[in-house]
Amino acid sequence: MPGFTCATCGNYHDELPLCFGAPAPDYYYSIPPEEREARTEKSADWCVIDDEHFFIRGRIEIPIIGYPERLVWNVWTSLSEHNFTRSQELWNDPLRVAEEPYFGWLQTVIPGYDNTLNIKTWVHTQPIGIAPQVEVFEEAHPLLLDQQNGMTLAHVQQIAERLLHEASSTSTQQ
Ligand SMILES: [Zn+2]
């Protein structure tokens, strides 16, 4: 893993972080902090708001051109109540890998794109213990193109330079 000289702080960082994400769906942050306990239910993997908005955490993986690892965004998508309930029922069932993908609206702001909220995704269930793979399919969206074509290492470094020094809901997750 190469270190890099950071354009933001001018220092050398030993590692290029490749995993970023948000600890909750974007909608969660629109709930006033003092109301969150009453209105939301949440684990590291799922979130329900007002008993009518259902979210699951997943991973968008983006190939890095000419590089063996991938850039990972930990993201949230909103599922239908039906699919959310199904994902909960099958949480510990090995047969869950046979699930058809669930439709999800992306619920995480991904830095570097004009808008990633409520773009269309497929949520692919993985074996027990592994977060779903999220596949963007919003037509012609730059995030879709990056997921299909990959990003350059230089571009990933630019993202890291920005996010390592930014206080926001999107944070480095190792
Ligand atoms: Zn820096």
Image (tube, helix red, strand yellow):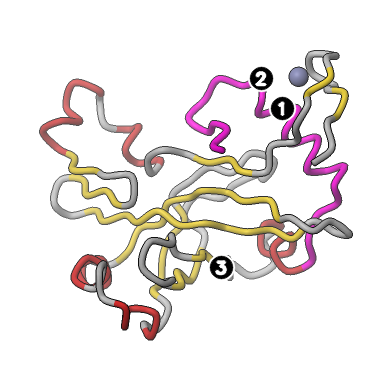
Q: Residue 138 in the image: x percent, y percent?
A: 58, 67
Given residues 120 and 164, the one toward you in this image is 164
Q: Secondary structure at mark 3?
A: strand
Q: Can you identify the residue that label 3 sits on?
A: 135
Q: Where 35 falls versus 118 (above or below)?
A: above
Q: Can you identify the residue that label 2 sits on?
A: 165
Q: Where 104 falls versus 115 (above or below)?
A: below
Quadrant of the image occupied by residue 167: top right
Q: Residue 165 in the image: x percent, y percent?
A: 66, 20
Drawn side of residue 64 relative to residue 174, left or right = right
Quadrant of the image occupied by residue 61: bottom right
Contact (CB < 8 A) between labels 2 and 1?
yes
Residue sitting at x 41%, y 38%: 23
Residue sitting at x 71%, y 27%: 162
At label 1, the amino acid type is: Arg
Residue sitting at x 89%, y 59%: 66
Q: Residues within 10 Å of mark 1 (few under 14, many from 20)?
A: some
Return the mark for residue 162.
1
Between the residue at mark 2 and the residue at mark 1, the CA separation in whole angstroms equals 6 Å
Given residues 78 and 138, the one toward you in this image is 78
Q: Residue 121 in the image: x percent, y percent?
A: 50, 67
Drawn side of residue 124 relative to residue 47, left or right = right
Dot 3 or dot 2: first in sequence order is 3
Between the residue at mark 1 and the residue at mark 3, the CA separation in whole angstroms equals 24 Å
At label 2, the amino acid type is: His
Mark 1 Cβ inside 8 Å of ligand 1: no
Which range is magenta? 149-174
